[in-house]
Image (cartoon, rainbow, N blue to C red):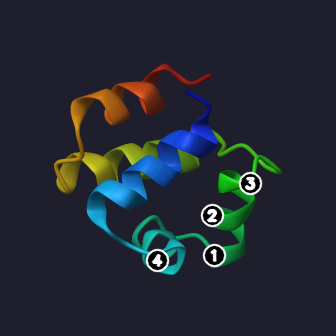
Amino acid sequence: MEISGTLKSIRAELNITQTEFAEAVHVSFSTVNRWENNRVIPNRMARALILNFCEKKNVSQALIDSIRLYK
């Protein structure tokens, strides 16, 4: 799965908006929107913030692994 799909799946699992996700990982709404539309790929620091958020929110392990494996 592409990272854009993984991010959408994380939001769907947690039932949160792009805005809520952006606030949680300390980026702008437009950044999340660009990630989810494959215009920009989250950098290493952003992926670390996303992983931290997912672990705290008990997101499914498959989605966490998908973020971890993305390079």
Q: CA distance from mark 1 to mark 4?
A: 7 Å
**N-terminal label among 1 and 4:** 4
How far apart are labels 2 and 3 at the CA level?
Answer: 9 Å
The residue closer to the viewer here, 69 or 1, is 1
Which residue matches tag 3?
A: 37
**Mark 3 and mark 1: Cα distance apart in space:** 14 Å
Q: Are marks 3 and 1 in contact (CB under 8 Å)?
A: no
Q: Nearer the viewer, residue 48 or 59?
A: 59
Residue contact at pointers 1 and 4, CB within 8 angstroms:
no
What amino acid does circle 4 point to? Answer: Glu
**Within-10-Å neighbours for mark 2: few <14, some 14–19, many 20+:** many
> Which residue lies at the image location 56% right of the left edge and 24% below the top edge?
70
Query: Counting other residues with Cα less than 10 Å from the Cα at mark 1, is it few (<14), some (14-19), or many (20 or more)?
Result: some
**Lateral position of residue 28 relative to residue 59, left or right:** right
| Residue ID for mark 4 | 23
Residue 45 location in percent, x, y? 56, 45
Q: Earlier in the sequence, mark 3 or mark 4?
A: 4
Residue at position x 33%, y 34% from top? 64
- The residue carrying mark 2 is 32
Q: Secondary structure at mark 2?
A: helix
Label 2 close to label 1 by CB (< 8 Å) = yes
- Could you tell me if the residues under marks 4 and 2 are in contact, i.e. CB atoms within 8 Å? no
Identify the residue under disc 1: 28
Q: Amino acid at mark 2?
A: Val
